Amino acid sequence: MPFGKQFDAVVLMLVLHTVNSSDRLLILKESLRVLKADGILVICDFVESSSERFVSLIIKKLIPSGSIPRRLRRRMAR
């Protein structure tokens, strides 16, 4: 698919909870592929306790640690 590094923002609105964890990872990787280097990735979704660990792992892998808000870092450490 074209569009590599062409979008200022990617919004995933109520998508990730509908797919399995391997598809979530593919969606996130594709979102980052089409996002400009200084772009914004917005994720708004339901988080069940069973998927909280997955979300924390994705955040840790995809976002430089210095840019994760302190409150979110504390929550991810639980």
Image (tube, rainbow, N blue to C red):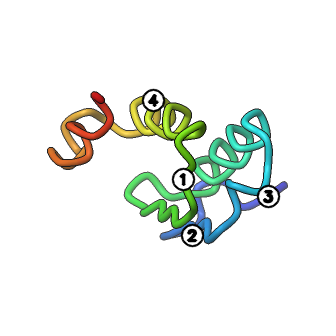
Residue at image position (43%, 61%) is: 39
> Which amino acid type is marked by label 1?
Val
Q: Position of residue 30 (x, y in %)?
A: 69, 48
> Which amino acid type is marked by label 3?
Pro
Q: Which residue is mark 1?
A: 47
In the visual, does 64 lie left or right of 18? left
Q: Earlier in the sequence, mark 2 or mark 3?
A: 3
- The image shows residue 15, relative to residue 30, as above or below, that is below
> Which is more foreground, mark 2 or mark 3?
2
Separation of residues labelled 3 and 1 (CA atoms): 31 Å
Quadrant in the rendering for residue 25? top right
> Which is more foreground, mark 4 or mark 3?
4
In the visual, does 64 lie left or right of 25? left
Instruction: Check disc 2 and report its element: helix, strand or loop.
Output: strand
> Which amino acid type is marked by label 2?
Val
Instruction: Check disc 3 and report its element: helix, strand or loop.
Output: loop
Q: Position of residue 31 (x, y in %)?
A: 63, 54
Instruction: Check disc 4 and report its element: helix, strand or loop.
Output: helix
Separation of residues labelled 4 and 1 (CA atoms): 18 Å
Q: Which residue is mark 3?
A: 2
Q: Which residue is mark 2?
A: 11
Quadrant in the rendering for residue 61? top left
Separation of residues labelled 4 and 3 (CA atoms): 24 Å
Mark 4 closeness class: few <14, some 14–19, many ≥20 residues within 10 Å:
few
Image quarter where the C terminus lies is top left
Query: Residues at badges 2 and 3 in contact (C-beta under 8 Å)?
Result: no
> Which amino acid type is marked by label 4?
Lys
Q: Which residue is mark 4?
A: 61
Q: Earlier in the sequence, mark 4 or mark 1?
A: 1
Q: Earlier in the sequence, mark 2 or mark 4?
A: 2
Relative depth, front residue between 30 and 12: 12
Relative depth, front residue between 78 and 39: 78
